[in-house]
Amino acid sequence: MSTNHPTSSPAPAAEPPPSSTSDAPAPSTSPVPAPAPAAPSSPSSRVSRVLRGALADLTPLREGAHYRRLWFGQAVSSIGQQMTAVAVAVQVYALTGSSFATGLVGLCSLVPLVTFGLYGGAIADTVDRRKLGLIGSAGLAAASAILAAQALLDLRQVAVLYCAVALQGAFFAISSPARSSMIPRLVPAEQLPAANALNTISMNLGLTVGPMLGGLLIGAYGFQAAYLVDTVAFAATLYAMWRLPAMRPERAPGVDADGRRGRASVLDGLRFLREQPNLRTSFLADLAAMIFGMPRALFPAIAAGFYGGDARTVGLLVGAPAVGALAGALFSGWIARVHRHGAAVLAAVTAWGLSIAAFGLTSGHLWLGLALLAVAGCADTVSMIFRNTMMQVAAPDEMRGRLQGIFIVVVAGGPRLGDFESGTVAALTTPAVSVISGGLACVACVLLLAARRPAFLRYDARHPPP
């Protein structure tokens, strides 16, 4: 009940003063017609309202010019980076004819991602994040320019490709924590779920559109075309970063009573995460999904053994989770109305594990398998949105960079551990047993986390304890 209206009877109205003119018109005594009842909404208008409520909330893009420019720049750069990833893999294989040499590309990227991810987060908690983002984006553009130059000069040196990929990994690890830490400073807290959903859209646009455009450009104009487009695409991110205001941490870490400033320590970030059970639980839930429920390394064997397919089938299996993730982000309008973020994370990871386990039972039914992988990708998007929001809201500003650095290590290292786990179990049993047992193990981990951390299930974004 509204409290804006008094509940007692109103006092009698004062007598009106006599009219100063005798010919003043008397007030009309005709009754005021009652307003016509509102016309019932048509089915099409109801469907339109439901769709508007289901689609991604664009409020951060409409209301925040800085966020809008940064989002657009990241979307364009993500597409370009995925074009380059395809071009590097294809070029290495064309030069060597070796799957092992092509696989080393991932290792060249992983090592600097893990190493510099932690230190990049610590740097982001000490310096102006805008400048760090500019340096990182400029470094990524330079690495793409090196790749373009070696293709134009036809150097045919695999070592140059490996070094350029390692350089990309290092600059991405340095700049990514700075970019992610900026988001809570660019949009209000109530818009963070919508902003994280939009960020997921830009990332998955890169994962879906980038490889397709890269393949078309490589086929039509050669490797140098993909590398050159990627280099030019970074202009959008550099422009967005340049227009941002200064982004120093709100309270620099390591400041003592005399105002002396210390360095942000990676170990401090790890200690902070250890002392914050809700944030730690969100990381553990993601690791459970990536280690036990990520059968990516088995896709070639599954394509042949389950469906009798070839490399094109492998491509469909790889792309299905990205398509589901993009759909989940596009239809994320409901997310802002959910406040129990901890319960939502565990529910999404459970859906991921169950979808993967069911995927292991789809032998002979390719489209059912692709649909289940898409559902898993959608669940992963939901989990990512809520986990990012929890990290941005519950952690103090001076710790956000280091937590984002740890997040990079989890995202980069988790799937690699998942490749090892799924490949080992498949070698000891069968690919089907590996997929099914991995999905069920993911669900078991979620149940264990829920039992050990009931406070995580009660986490409320309106009152966010870390």
Image: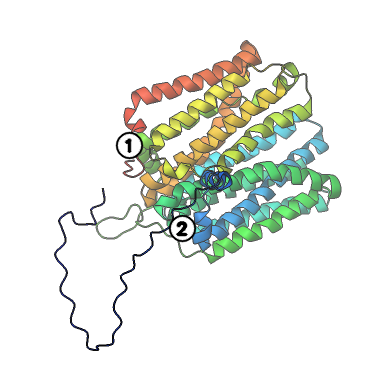
Q: Residue 63 appears at what percent x and percent y? A: 49, 60
| Disc 2 target residue | 186
Q: Which of marks 2 and 1 is in front?
A: 2
Q: Residue 403 appears at what percent x and percent y? A: 43, 43
Q: How many labels does the image show?
A: 2
Q: State the CA–CA distance, disc 2 to disc 1.
A: 27 Å
| Crowdedness near tag 1: few (<14), some (14–19) or many (≥20) residues, C-alpha within 10 Å | few
Label 1, secondary structure: give it: helix
Question: Residue 458's image quarter?
Answer: top left
| Crowdedness near tag 2: few (<14), some (14–19) or many (≥20) residues, C-alpha within 10 Å | many
Q: Residue 291 appears at what percent x and percent y? A: 54, 26
Identify which residue is drawn at 61% across, 24% down.
Answer: 295
Q: Residue 45 appears at what percent x and percent y? A: 55, 48
- Taking depth in this image into account, of 388 and 26 the one nearest to the observer is 26
Label 2, secondary structure: give it: helix
Asked if residue 256 can be seen in this view, the reply is yes
- Amino acid carrying mark 2 in the image: Leu
Asked if residue 150 can be seen in this view, the reply is no
Residue at the far top in the pictured view: 429
Question: Residue 422's image quarter?
Answer: top right
| Disc 1 target residue | 275
- Amino acid carrying mark 1 in the image: Glu
